Amino acid sequence: MTLSRREFVAAAVALQPPARRPNVLVFMTDQESALLPGPVQLPNRARLEPGAVKFTSAFCNTPQCSAARSSLLTGLEPHQTGVLTNVDGSSLGKPLDSKLPTVGSVFQAAGYSTGYFGKWHLGGESEGLARFGFATHHPHRKDEEDALQAAEWIRGQRGPWLAWVSIINPHDIYQLPKLLSEVQPRTGVLPPRTGLDDLKGRPSEQREYVDKDQGRATREYTPEDWVRYRTYYCELVEAADRCLGTVLDALPGLDSTVVVYTSDHGDALGEHGLPFKGPFMYEELISIPLWICAPGAPLGKAPRTDLVTQADLAPTLASLAGLTWPREVSGVDLTRQPNDRTAVFLEYYAKQKWVNPIRTIRTRRWKLNWYDRGNKELYDLATDPYETRNRAGDAELKTVQADLEKRLTAWRKPLLAPQPK
């Protein structure tokens, strides 16, 4: 007998008794770094604080919208989902394959009502998201409207439900160059610790970003201009928090709902003279917020310092709902705590149609970025947390660099092999 994809997923999902299944809310911002550049007022995120586990070493699998989102939804790394870069007319990215199990399809097969609200950015949205397991779909319009739509839908649910709410901010930082003079600097926001001069001796891809790409918009910024940039960024994060409040107000209660707060990737925040995002793997860009509230505290209660990536979210959500993910994934179930990773592996492929692949290994102390052109960056995060000194090629660290390169090469080998369907 041949099973359809939906039948296969349903057969593979192990369920808890229906009365014990929690509702699930994933609230995702766009381009929010975990390393915020100044004081912010986040009263709605504070509502999660009593029951939330904060993951203080959470990283995006890639600092780019579409590819990162593919990992969050599938538990796979971008080279496994096939979404290597952004999916839009100006980029090289391929849409997410609907044959891959997603959070939507796995939960729907388990009897959940499923809804997706806001930015998708994985292709094929005009056809709806039913083939990805989201029966209800409200495309992005404005963040406030997306939050209201999600809240209205949640209030109308009676059985177990999963809502994925994907807002734009603080991605609207891209508007800053034309608003710069209107922004009033916020007390407590400091200029970046590093500047464009810091790019000397760095891989040429970063300089090209400044000279030929989006970095041109801020190339002449003064320290005062960067304070305005970072102030506006903080304001956008606060705007996102207001949307979170709209959705939280609709919940029947945190005692019956798993709530996730996260983002697809960070922002360079002006460090090293770089705005927005591009071909670099600095901490501001790869560090993301990850808070998870779950009834019964299966993730523990204290902040978690274990190394995690976005690919961990899908199998963790399944576990929290008493489900079994229907195929092998790269992510790990964070309820099996703590995970024993000593490193995470990240990747980057292209900026629109400018192909400049980077592969990264990030341990607790070390970070090695290896560009396909052969350029390398090595940082000792224990003594140089702001990544001001590239130690690649340093004789004192020859053994350290060789070990990191060996591990990164071993991780890269499967990238060259055909991926399972």
Image: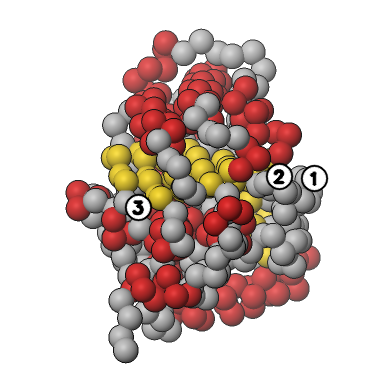
Closer to us: 368 or 396: 368
Describe the element under mark 1 as helix, strand or loop: loop
Q: Residue at x 63, y 51 (%)?
A: 58
Q: Earlier in the sequence, mark 2 or mark 3?
A: 2
Q: Position of 201 compared to 114: left or right? A: right
Say which residue label 1 marks.
302
Q: Mark 1: which amino acid?
A: Ala
- Please determine whether, in this image, residue 179 is positioned above or below residue 157: above
Q: Mark 2: which amino acid?
A: Val
Quarter of the C terminus within the rendering: bottom left
Q: Position of 291 compared to 318: left or right? A: right
- Cα–Cα gap, marks 2 and 3: 27 Å
Say which residue label 2 marks.
53
Mark nearest the camera among 1 and 3 is 3
Q: Is residue 392 visible?
A: no
- Mark 1 crowd level (few <14, some 14–19, many ≥20, 10 Å Cα): few
Q: Position of residue 218 (x, y in %)?
A: 42, 30
Say which residue label 3 marks.
134
Q: Residue at x 62, y 66 (%)?
A: 332
- Mark 2 crowd level (few <14, some 14–19, many ≥20, 10 Å Cα): many
Closer to us: 311 or 359: 311
Closer to us: 203 or 92: 92
